[in-house]
Image (cartoon, helix red, strand yellow):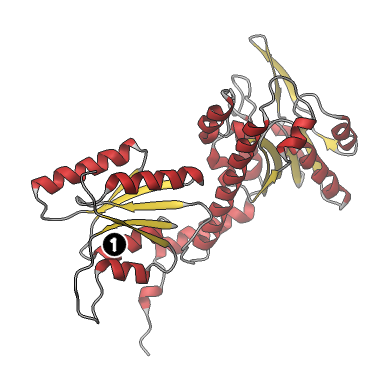
């Protein structure tokens, strides 16, 4: 039997996997407690888990506590060791700064850090607290931390749309994507309203929308964790938890119907809208004009646009769809021409081979 060398990963890919495995072994583990609104209970959940871990014999310390704490949290903190924050005053503003040097010397198994989105004073080792957490992780120290969805930078536009307010501090979503574990601290909006909170508390409808944002964000993080695991072990990923809609455009496509339907679905599930077209060597000026108009509409609707090259339309589209982990593919089609019974049209081939994604067909219409 002749060995199939085509399945062997190239040396650069093997090196990348080894380096990723080595980094993962020496890096501390990160767990994020994600809340969808203030007072949902994320800090209580984090500190209570720390208490349970300490009772099991793990070396746990508290490095930061956010604001005034409830009696329940005070009772838990009384049972845990703390490396207190350092209080610094700059330009009349008080900062609570994590004692990184003390934590490096102490080197506990787990550090609990509340208020992840906090800023550090000018001149600090890091401008923001989440960067302090990165340093602890790189030193092999595990971290449990808590944050609300309103503080995730890439989600702040959505939160502002719901509440009309924008948090002043932020944490990049890329930080959450590095988490080994993420836990949504969930509670029905009605229960949260029952805890009070004053005039600043969002109403029930707003809380429901914020809750959905947090759940989708957590699902996206889990999706990326899965993709990282599959990539690390050389397993080809074919699906994810985030809805990813790929609209395939041509000069004749009914672009308006396809794109608007795709955008509605992407927004409904807080997913991604992708647009692809396969470059043609010979295209008439009129078809080029129509294609450019379709692509302009895609840009106006906020789609991510990709130009693909290849001789076989089906192979090119399916290869790209799998690479991008598309969950749905939108295609335009004409009335099927008569073909020999043993011959499939490109659309029929694509439908037959797209076993890991849904395909939706849109009949070609008038100008988009």
Q: Residue furthest top?
A: 92
Q: Is residue 269 above or below residue 338?
A: above
x, y percentage for residue 145? 70, 39
180 versus 65 height, above or below: below
Residue at 74% across, 38% down? 42
Q: At which x and y percent is residue 367? A: 20, 44
**Which image quarter: residue 94?**
top right
Q: Residue at x 23, y 57 (%)?
A: 309
Estimate how packed mark 1 is, as few (under 14), some (14 to 19) or many (20 or more) residues with alpha carbons within 10 Å.
some
* Quadrant of the drawing holding the N terminus: bottom left
Number of marks in the rendered image: 1
Residue at the limit of the structure toward the bottom, as seen here: 1
Q: Is residue 270 visible?
A: no
Question: Residue drawn at (66%, 27%), measured in percent from left and top?
Answer: 202
In the rendered image, the quadrant that contains the C terminus is: top left
Instruction: Answer with left or right where residue 54 lies relative to residue 242.
Output: right
Query: Residue 145: in sight, yes or no?
Result: yes
Residue linked to disc 1: 316
Q: In the figure, 317 relative to 110: above or below? A: below
Q: Nearer the viewer, residue 185 or 291?
A: 291
- Image spot of residue 243 (x, y percent): 48, 52
On the image, which quarter does residue 204 sit in? top right
Residue nearest the observer in this picture, 36 or 133? 36
* Mark 1 secondary-structure assignment: helix
Residue 260, picture quadrant: top left
Between 233 and 151, the one lying in front of the other is 151
């Amino acid at each position: 039997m002749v060995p199939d060398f085509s399945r062997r990963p190239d040396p650069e890919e093997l090196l990348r996997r080894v380096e990723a495995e080595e980094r993962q072994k020496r890096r501390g583990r990160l767990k994020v407690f994600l809340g969808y609104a203030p007072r949902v209970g994320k800090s209580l959940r984090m500190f209570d888990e720390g208490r349970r871990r300490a009772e099991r014999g793990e070396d746990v310390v508290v490095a930061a506590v956010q604001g005034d704490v409830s009696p329940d949290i005070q009772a838990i903190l009384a049972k845990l060791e703390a490396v207190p924050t350092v209080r610094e005053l700059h330009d009349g503003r008080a900062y609570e700064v994590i004692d990184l040097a003390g934590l490096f010397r102490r080197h506990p198994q787990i550090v609990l850090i509340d208020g992840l989105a906090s800023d550090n004073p000018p001149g600090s080792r890091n401008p923001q607290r989440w960067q302090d957490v990165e340093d602890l992780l790189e030193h092999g120290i595990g971290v449990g931390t808590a944050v609300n969805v309103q503080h995730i930078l890439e989600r702040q536009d959505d939160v502002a749309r719901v509440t009309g307010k924008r948090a002043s501090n932020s944490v990049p979503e890329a930080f959450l994507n590095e988490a080994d574990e993420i836990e949504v601290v969930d509670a029905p909006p009605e229960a949260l309203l029952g805890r009070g909170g004053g005039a600043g508390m969002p109403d029930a409808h707003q809380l429901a929308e914020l809750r959905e944002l947090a759940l989708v964000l957590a699902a996206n993080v889990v999706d990326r964790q899965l993709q990282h695991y599959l990539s690390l072990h050389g397993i080809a990923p074919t699906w994810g938890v985030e809805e990813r809609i790929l609209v395939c455009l041509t000069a004749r496509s009914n672009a308006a119907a396809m794109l608007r339907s795709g955008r509605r679905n992407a927004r409904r599930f807080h997913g991604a809208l992708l647009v692809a077209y396969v470059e043609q060597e010979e295209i008439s000026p009129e078809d080029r004009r129509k294609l450019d108009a379709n692509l302009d509409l895609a840009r106006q609707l906020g789609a991510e646009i990709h130009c693909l090259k290849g001789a076989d339309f089906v192979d090119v589209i399916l290869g790209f769809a799998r690479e991008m982990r598309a969950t749905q593919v939108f295609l335009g089609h004409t009335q099927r021409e008569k073909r020999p019974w043993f011959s499939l049209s490109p659309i029929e081939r694509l439908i037959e081979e797209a076993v890991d994604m849904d395909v939706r067909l849109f009949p070609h219409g008038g100008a988009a």
